[in-house]
Image (cartoon, rainbow, N blue to C red):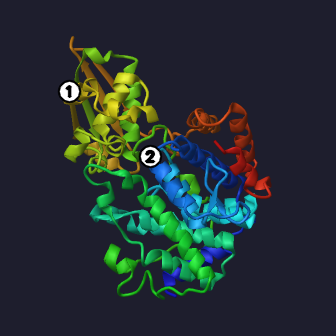
Amino acid sequence: MDRTTERLSALVCDLHYDDLTPQTVHQVKRVLVDTLACAMGAYLSEPAKIARHLASTVKSAGEHGARILGTRDASSPELAGFANAVMVRYLDYNDMSGGGHPSDSIPGPLAVAYPRGSDGRAVITALVVNYEVARQVGGHVQQTFQRGWDHGILRALGAACASGKIMGLDRERLGHAISLAVVPNVALGQTRVGELSMWKGMAGPHGTKAGIFAAQMAECGVTGPFEPFDGSEGLWAKLVGHPVQWEEEGWSEPSSIHETRFKFFPSQGGTQGPTGLAVELHAQVSPADIAAIHLELPDGLFLRAVHEPEKWHPQTRETADHSIPYLVAVALHDGVVTPASFTPQRIHDPALRALISHMTIDPNPEFSRRYPDEVNCRLEITTGSGSTHVAHCVYPKGFPQNPMSDADVEAKFRACCADLLTAHQCDRALELLWSLEAQPNLKDLFDTLVV
C-alpha cells in the first residue's frame, strides 16, 4: 500500500460520528435533502427509466437488496446505486465542489446502508467521508480535467471509501477498495465536450457503481494494485505528471462538505451566475425590446459553456444545460429556469434563437484575475431605444458566500417532488431527513419516497 493510500485509508477508518460538529451534521442533512430533491425531479427522465430498468433485471428481496428510489423494488447495491445516481445527476441540479459533483456518489453508501440496516449516524459519517476524500484527491487532479480527463474517478473513489465505511472495512481492506476504485476507472473528458449525450448524466453514476463494486470486492478479500497513486504507472504519474506532496494529516473540522456549492438553477456550475443575472433583468426589460446582450465573465467559465460552437446552437438537453448563451436567453425570456426549460420544443424555440443572435460574451481580465476565488459576472442589456440595464454578481446564489437557506433547500425539494409525491409524503420525507441522526435505518425514508 503506497503512502497516499495509507493516508486515505487512515482518514476514513479513524473518522467517527462523534468527531463531527453539529454544524457538519446539519450540513450533511442539507446536502441530502438537496440530493434527493434532484433525484426525484429526474424520476421520469428517459435515462432514469433506462437505469431503473437495468437495475430491475437483478431482483433482490426487499430486506436483502438495495432499494431503487421512488419504487418498492430492490436490486444489487451496485445497480441500485447506479440507477439512483443517474436520477441524482440527470437534471444537473445537484451540488458541485472541487472536482465535479460529489453528491453523485451519495447513492453509493445509501445502497450499501439499506440492506445492512445501517443507522442515520453511520450514513452521515459515510457522507462526510465521501466529501473529504473527493476534496483531498480532487485538489491534486482538478487541473487534469481541463487536459482531457474526467471526474468520474473521484466519484468511484468517494463511493468506495463511503461504502467501505458503511461496511466497516479495516485499513487494509479499505486500502484495497481504494486501489480497486482508482486503477480501473480513469475516465475521458470527451463526456463533456461538444454536443452532449445521455452519458453526461451517467458518467458520474458509473463511477459510483464502480466504487460500490470496488468496496464489495475488497470486503470479499480481493486485493488491488499496491501502488495505485504513487507507483510508476499510478494516478499521480499518469494524470498529474509528477509526484504529489501529500500535506493533509488526518481528520479535522470544518469538514469539506461545508465548501460545496448548491445549485439554484438546473444547469452546469459555471452557468449559475449568468443565469441568475438574466432572471434579475427579466423584470426590467421586455424580450421584444432587446437589441443587444453583452456578458462579461472570467476566462475560466468559457471552456465548455461558451467557446464550443455547439453551445450557441444546442440540440440536446444535456448541451442546453451547459450552454451560457441558451440559459441567458431562456432566463431573459421567461424569468425562470426550471427543468421545463429544457424540453425539445423550448430548446429549438425561434424566440430564444433570436435572443442568442443578439448576444456577445467576452472575458473580463479583472474577473479572470480574481477567479476562482470570486466568480464575477456582468450582464448588460441594451434596448432598441438605447437604454441600458446592468446586473453584476460576485458569488451566485448557492455558493457558501451566498448560501441557500434551509427554507430554500426545502422549497427546491418540494418543487422537484410536486408531480410525484403528495404534500404529506414531502412533509414526512423532510421530517425524516432533518432528523436523520435519530433514524434506526433508511427504510422509512425510502418507503416515504415511493412514487
Work out whether residue 253 can be spotted.
no
Residue at (73% x, 34% y) in the render: 424
Label tally? 2
Find residue 287 and report its image quarter.
Answer: top left
Q: Nearer the viewer, residue 24 or 334?
A: 334
How far across and down, in percent of the image, does residue 399 sit?
A: 49, 44
Image position of 308 (left or right of 63)? left
Q: Nearer the viewer, residue 54 or 422?
A: 54
How far across and down, in percent of the image, does residue 77 sit?
A: 60, 66
Residue at (67% x, 75% y) in the render: 14
Query: Rounded to the nearest whole Å, what is the CA distance between mark 2 and mark 1?
Result: 33 Å
How far across and down, in percent of the image, does residue 340 sit?
A: 44, 32
Extreme residue toward the top, this view: 385
* Residue corresponding to mark 1: 358
Q: Residues within 10 Å of mark 1 (few under 14, many from 20)?
A: some
Element type where label 2 sits in the image: helix
Image position of 115 (left or right of 137)? right
How far across and down, in percent of the image, does residue 237 sit?
A: 34, 80
Q: Which amino acid type is shown beneath numbered disc 1?
A: His
Q: Nearer the observer, disc 2 or disc 1?
A: 2
Residue 213, placed above or below residue 155: below
Q: Which amino acid type is shown beneath numbered disc 2?
A: Glu
Q: Earlier in the sequence, mark 2 or mark 1?
A: 2
* Residue corresponding to mark 2: 46
Residue 73, placed above or below residue 175: above
Which quadrant holds the C terminus?
top right
